[in-house]
Amino acid sequence: MLEALGARVRSLREGRGMPRRALADLSGVSPRFLAQLESGEGNISVARLADVALALGATPAALLGPPDGALDGGGPPSLVSARIQALLGRRSEEELREVLAWLEARFLPASGPTVALLGVRGAGKSTVGQRLAERLELPFHELDQLIEEAAGLTLGEIFELHGEAYYRRLERETLLHYLAAHPTGVLATGGSLVTDRESFRLLRRRALTVWLKARPEDHWNRVIQQGDQRPMAQNPHAMQELRALLAAREKLYAEAEYTIDTSLSSLDEVVERLAEVVQRHLP
């Protein structure tokens, strides 16, 4: 057993291009004892073995348990798996639950009708989403609002204080938490989410994505009807910029599973069509 253990430690160390001195510094085990261990003569304690395993990005069980070749000849998947086990080995129960929630949100198929509404501001995501959620008796959330709650700041303050990169990271984290906590529901997303490939890929994997498509004039008029005059305030080119924005994102929005044109439809008609789509996806 000691010979097999020593061979695995040596093979894993050499496979990483790690000098014995470097492993000694990382693990706190002397180079002399590591030499004895690798030769099969060192009877290492469990605690010291754990230190060596952690320094190698493995686990004591991985060094002791696998048959010959599982670590030293098993290739990258075995090493990656061992490193993941090492990282998780000292986590608290609360931290492990957080990791589990992230993994389930990222990789498990959706277990229920989670509907994600896409579109530029003025598409009707909030209005349609609320009505659809009431119709299907599902919870309704707006991703932008969840992001603000997580940051303790408004969206404007997030961009001003931290920049877009921080916002995108927070958007992905908030989306993951939402998907982990809500196996079913209706979610109104931010208009620019589709420009973040990772977030959009996650959303398409875990939810039924629907693009609420509309003409630029409809987007404009709906925002104005909400009492927001900012689109036209001190910006004579606002409509031109809106058209350009829609044109730039059209291919991204078109990647949604469904597209519903809301320009010539009433609110009731749009909700009815959406409800029919969701019903077809119920188990």
Image (tube, helix red, strand yellow):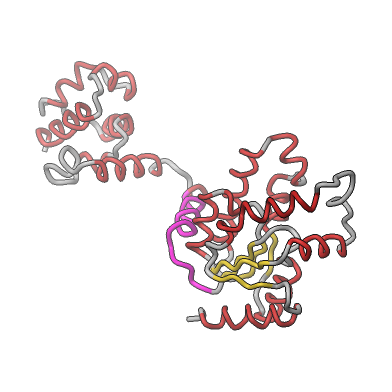
Image quadrant in which the N terminus is located:
top left
Question: What is the magenta segment's predominant secondary structure?
Answer: helix
Q: Is residue 53 magenta?
A: no
Query: Quick one: 270 or 175, which is closer to the camera?
Result: 270
On screen, residue 91 above or below 226: above
Residue at image location 64% in from the left, 55% down from the top = 247
Residue 132 in the figure: left or right of residue 36: right
Residue 124 in the figure: left or right of residue 62: right
Q: Position of residue 26 (x, y in %)?
A: 34, 23
On screen, residue 225 above or below 231: below
* Res 72 quadrant in image: top left
On screen, residue 67 above or below 7: below
Residue at image location 56% in from the left, 48% down from the top = 196
Query: Quick one: 110 or 250, which is closer to the camera?
Result: 250
Q: Position of residue 123 (x, y in %)?
A: 72, 64
Q: Is residue 107 magenta?
A: yes
State the count of labels.
0
Query: Quick one: 218 or 273, which is closer to the camera?
Result: 218
Residue 235 in the figure: left or right of residue 159: right
* Res 143 quadrant in image: bottom right
Q: Position of residue 93 (x, y in %)?
A: 48, 50
The magenta span reads: 96-112
Q: Position of residue 208 (x, y in %)?
A: 54, 69
Query: Quick one: 273 or 172, which is closer to the camera?
Result: 273
Residue at image location 44% in from the left, 66% down from the top = 109
Residue at image location 57% in from the left, 69% down from the top = 114
